[in-house]
Image (spheres, rainbow, N blue to C red):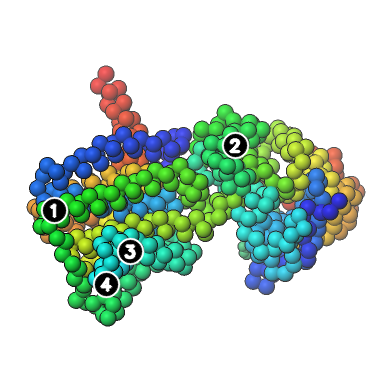
Amino acid sequence: MKSSISSVRRPRRQGLVWFVPLAIALALVPLFFNNYYAQQATFVCMYAALALSWNVIGGFTGYPSFSTAAFVGLGAYAGAILQNAGMPMMLAWVAATAVTALFAAVLGYAILRMKGHYFAIGSIAIVESMRLLASSWSSLTGGGEGLNLPIFPGGPDHAGRVFFYAMFVVMIVAAMMSLWLDRSRLGFGLRCVQQNEDAADMVGVNVNASKIAAFVLSALFCGTTGAISASWVSYISPPDAFSILMTLKVPVMALLGGAGTVLGPVLGALVFVLVEQTLMSRFLDYSQAMLGVIIVFLIFFLPGGLLGAGLFERLSGRLARLRRASA
Amino acid sequence: MSPLLRVEGVSRYFGGVAAVNKVSFELAPGEIVGLIGPNGAGKTTLVNLVTGVLRPSAGRVWFEGADVTAQRPWQASRRGLARTFQIVQPFPQMTVLENVAAGALFGGGAASRPEAEDVAMEFLEFVGLAPLAERSAMSLTLPSRKRLELAKSLAMRPKVLLLDEVNAGLNSAEIGAAIELIRQIAARGVTIMLIEHLMKVVFSLCDRLLVLHHGELIAQGDPRAVASDPAVVKAYLGSKYAAQEQQVGAGPVDAADPVDTPSGGGHD
Ligand SMILES: Nc1ncnc2c1ncn2[C@@H]1O[C@H](COP(=O)(O)OP(=O)(O)OP(=O)(O)O)[C@@H](O)[C@H]1O
Ligand SMILES: [Mg+2]
C-alpha cells in the first residue's frame, strides 16, 4: 500500500464507472428474479450501506471501529419500539436514524480519545454492553425473548420488494454521502487526521469535532439499516441485533473493496455476500472459517483492497513483465 | 508598538522538572527574533506552549491582546499563529500540493478546495517546490520536506511564524537559500521567531536573540551582545569549552564563524 507512486487520489475517482451500472442491475433484480434473489440483493444493499458507513470512520479517518453492530442494533430496537408504540413504519425508520446519530455523537465524544487497538477494543466493547443492556432491560426491549413487530401486509413477494427498495435507497444515499464527503472540507480534514493527527491539528483542522462528525456519519445509515431489517424480519433479539459476527464482517468487506476508496466498500460487500452465499449453500459448517480465510488473504495479497492503489499497478506491472518475458 | 505576542511567566513541568521556567518575552510586529539554547534547553517546549500543543503549568500567553493560554493548536493556526515542527510532520500519502492546500483551507481560511489549491501552488512556487506538486509527500528528500513544512505553514497566512530548526540537516548551499527564503517571508510582513543552532543563520537574520538554558531565559537582546555575554558562553558551551575558550581567547560564538556551534545543529 505504501507505494510512492504520486497521489492516492486517482483510483478514488473511477468509482462511478462501475457503480452506476451495478446499481441499475441491482435495482432490476426483484423485477426479474424470484424472492430468493430479491432477498440476496437486499443483503448486498444492506451490507454495502454498512461498509460505506464504516469506511467513513475506518477508511477516511483511520479509526478501526467495531461499533457497526452497536448502531445497527440500536436502530433495530429504536425502530421496533417506536413502531410497536404506533409510529408509522417509515417514520420509525427516520426516528431510529436520529436516535442512532445522537448516540454516536455522545459515544464518539467519549471513545474517540482512544487510538489504535485501544479504540478498536473500546468500540467492540460497546456492542457487548448494548447486547447486555438489551437482554436485561426487559420492560422496554422484551429481554432475551426479543420483540415482535407488525408483519408487513401484502404477502412475501410484495414485502420482499418493498424492503429491497428501502435498502437500495439507503445504499444510494450512503454512496452519495461518500461522494460528497470525498470532495468536502470535512472529508479533506478527515484524510488529514488519518495521515497525521498532530499535523492536522497544526494546519487548523478541528480534529475532535471532525472525528465526532465522522463517527456520526458512520452510524447514521447503520441505524436506518437496523430499523429496516427489524421491520423486514418482524422479530429482533439481542444476539441478532447486536451481532459480533456482523461487527467483524463489515470492516472486512470495506477492506476487501479498498478502505478509503469512495465506493470500493460496495464492491467488497457484493463480493463478500456472493461468496458467502455460494459457500453457505455448499459448506454450511465452514462459512465462519471463510471469514478468517478472507482476512488472511486480504492482509497478505490485497493490502489496498480490490480498488486500492496497489492492485491495478501491480497487475499491470506483472502483465508487462509477462509480455517482456514472452517476447 | 503594542506586542503581537506576549508570553508572561510561562512554566511547564514534566514530572517535577521544569522544562520551561517562568519565561517572559514579547514579539513586536515585523521582528525576526532568534531563540537559541543548548539541546534540551526547552525551546521546542516553549513553542508547544505558545501554540497550544501543551498547556502551561503556570503563566499566560497573549496574542493580539487576547489571552490565548488555553487555545488548541488548530485555534492558534486559525488566529495566525503558525509553527513548523522540528521533526517534519507531512501528510505522507497526500501529494505535496494537498499538504499545502490543507494549510490554506483550514488554517488560512480559503473558501473552497480549488481556492486552497491555488493558494498552495503560489506558496509552492515561493519555496521552490512547484515542480514536485503532484509527488507524494513521503517521496521527498529531507531538504524538500523542510520546505514543504514551510510552505504548509505559510499557506495558513500567519501573522507570527515559529520556525523550529527548519535548517537542521541542510548543507551550506541549502542553508544560504533558506536564509534568503526566511528574509523574503519577513518582507511579506510575517513576524518570525527562529529556533536555530547555526550562528551564521542567527546572525544574518535576527534583530534580537533570546537564550534559553535549563528552561530559563538567561539573556536577551542584540545578537552580538548576547553572544559575548559570559553567562551565555558558559551555559551554551559548558565549562569544558569555556576553559578552552580562555586559552584561545576568542569569542566562541564568533559572528564570523560560518560553522556549527559545538552543541551541534546537525541533528533533526
Ligand atoms: N512531552 C514531554 N514529556 C517529558 N519530558 C519532555 C517532554 N517534552 C520535552 N521534555 C523534556 O523537556 C526538556 C526540554 O526539551 P525540548 O525538546 O523543549 O528542548 P529543545 O531546546 O527543543 O532541544 P533540542 O535543541 O534538542 O531540540 C528536555 O529535557 C526534554 O527531555
Ligand atoms: Mg527542539
Q: Which residue is mark 4?
A: A85
Same subunit: marks 2 and 3: no
Instruction: Report the chain holding disc 3.
Output: A
| Label 1 CB sits under 8 Å from any ligand 1 atom | no
Q: Which residue is mark 2?
A: B120
Same subunit: marks 4 and 1: yes
The reply to whether dot 2 and dot 1 touch (C-beta < 8 Å) is no
Q: Is residue A282 visible?
A: yes
Instruction: Report the chain holding disc 2.
Output: B
Q: Quadrant of residue B108?
A: top right
The reply to whether dot 2 and dot 3 touch (C-beta < 8 Å) is no
Instruction: Report the chain holding disc 1.
Output: A
The location of residue B173, given as percent across then percent down, is: 70, 32
- Is residue B138 placed above or below A246 in the rendered structure? above
Q: Which residue is mark 1?
A: A158
N-terminal-most mark, 3 or 1: 3
Same subunit: marks 2 and 1: no
- Is residue A264 placed above or below A71 in the rendered structure? above
The location of residue B77, given as percent across then percent down, is: 64, 51
Type of amino acid at the residue the image marks with label 4: Ala
Q: Quadrant of the C terminus of chain A?
A: top left
Type of amino acid at the residue the image marks with label 2: Ala
Element type where label 1 sits in the image: helix
Residue at 73 percent of width and 48 percent of height:
B160
Residues packed near mark 2 inside 10 Å, few (<14), some (14 to 19) or many (20 plus): many
Whole-number angstrom distance, CA of label 3 to CA of label 1:
24 Å
Whole-number angstrom distance, CA of label 2 to CA of label 4:
56 Å
* Labels 3, 1: front one: 1
Q: Quadrant of the N terminus of chain A?
A: top left
The location of residue B144, given as percent across then percent down, is: 60, 37
